[in-house]
Amino acid sequence: MIDPLPSASLLTMAPLHLPGALATVHLDAVADNTRLFAERIPGRLMAVVKADGFGHGAVDVARTALLHGASWLGVTSLPEAFELRDAGLAAPVLSWLNPVDADFATAVRRNVDIAVADRAHLAAVVAAARQSGRRARVHLHLDTGMARDGAAPGDWASLCASARVHELRGDVRVVGVMGHLARAESAERRDDEGLSRFRTGLAVARRAGLRPELRHLAATSATLTDPRSHHDMVRVGAGLVGIDPSDTTTLAPALSLSAPVIGVRRVPAGTGVGYHHVHRTTRDTTLALIPVGYADGLPRSAAGQAEVWLAGRRRRLVGAISMDQSVVDMGDDPVRIGEEATVFGPAAPGSEALPPTIEEWATWAGTIPHEVVTGLGRRVDRLYRGNAVAVRPCAVGGDR
Ligand SMILES: *Cc1c(COP(=O)(O)O)cnc(C)c1O
């Protein structure tokens, strides 16, 4: 006897050669966003490409940004800076958060600027400079209101004084003074207190005899909303990949995530789906399986609200998001094996599709878009589209 409703058997299974999840990086969007920022500021634009370019690929985002108006690159750690140098990028690079025993000698040798927030780091950088026989280029980092990295205001004057001593001895050159605003991540726009702490810090540096050519404070949000924060340079990361924490500006999203349907089954009402049966079907329905889960970057906490675009409309993900897979409720609509579900991303030009945005995913998961894009897993294939970037070993002449 054949069970007329094989609720537990897979009706169709994909052949094994189907591709898995695919992240498409839209470099033309990065180019558009870079131009928008470059046009809005009087000074220089640093493209912040930390965390692998916010999950978009540090080298490709960096190259694109440098071709469209950025002149500096910024990263958190030295290994991220060396990756850019290894790729042949010769533009100025600043690295701002390192342990005191980081490889500053290589940083000096490879012409990577180092942010310094305390005297222990300054001493380590000075030692590296002497060892390399070259001046280290440093940016003094003042905490402008986060009690995180950056020199505490009470230590700032002595840091500036020490840096000046080492500048006069020829060990370092203080190229910049930087701060970072506590509201950089949010839509709350003005940070008068952060601005005023920065101005005070600049005055202290000046009194110590320092003449940094680059004063830089603003990230994406302040760049878009508060020209008083622009100073000589702004450091923009999220904005280049289309994320606007200030919610004031339409930027071009630069990342899509898609995955093919690899299984389809018809199930009766009352079927428990996935781990713990957090979802139970309320009627007969068709379930489509996509091979993408929280290890690939879908926040597990978005389950219950999350949707994808599949077969012509938005569809609910049902049940828990697993490590490697998710289940889409198709209702009575047909779906083919191999059909692409768009998890998030901009619609293709000319298409009527309205896939979820990264911002929607962030809302569903109770987080910010930054966490969604930096969460892409390693097994997701990447495809770089648009603005085929010529490999240009960005020549930067003289003393910048
Ligand atoms: C991440 C970061 C930035 C860029 O911030 P966005 O809001 O992504 O533009 C700038 N400066 C510092 C110190 C950062 O850590």
Image (cartoon, grey):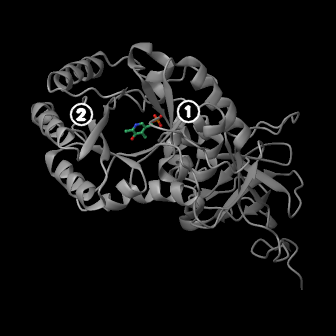
* Amino acid at dot 2: Asp
Q: Residue tagged by mark 1?
A: 239
Q: Position of residue 228 (x, y in %)?
A: 39, 13
Residue at x 30%, y 28% (from the top left corner): 212
Q: Position of residue 130 (x, y in %)?
A: 23, 57
Asked which secondary structure carries label 2, the reply is: loop
Q: Nearer the viewer, residue 166 or 362?
A: 166
Beta carbon of the mark 1 residue lies under 8 A of ligand 1: yes
For label 1, the crowd category at 10 Å Cα-Cα, with few meaning under 14, some 14 to 19 and many 20 or more, is: many
Q: Left of 1 or right of it: where is 240? A: left
Q: Nearer the viewer, residue 97 or 340?
A: 97
Asked if 389 appears above or below 399 in the picture, the reply is: below
The residue sitting at the bottom extreme is 1
Where residue 143 is drawn, which disc sits there?
Answer: 2
Residues under labels 2 and 1: Cα distance? 23 Å
Earlier sequence position, callout 2 versus callout 1: 2
Q: Nearer the viewer, residue 197 or 187?
A: 197
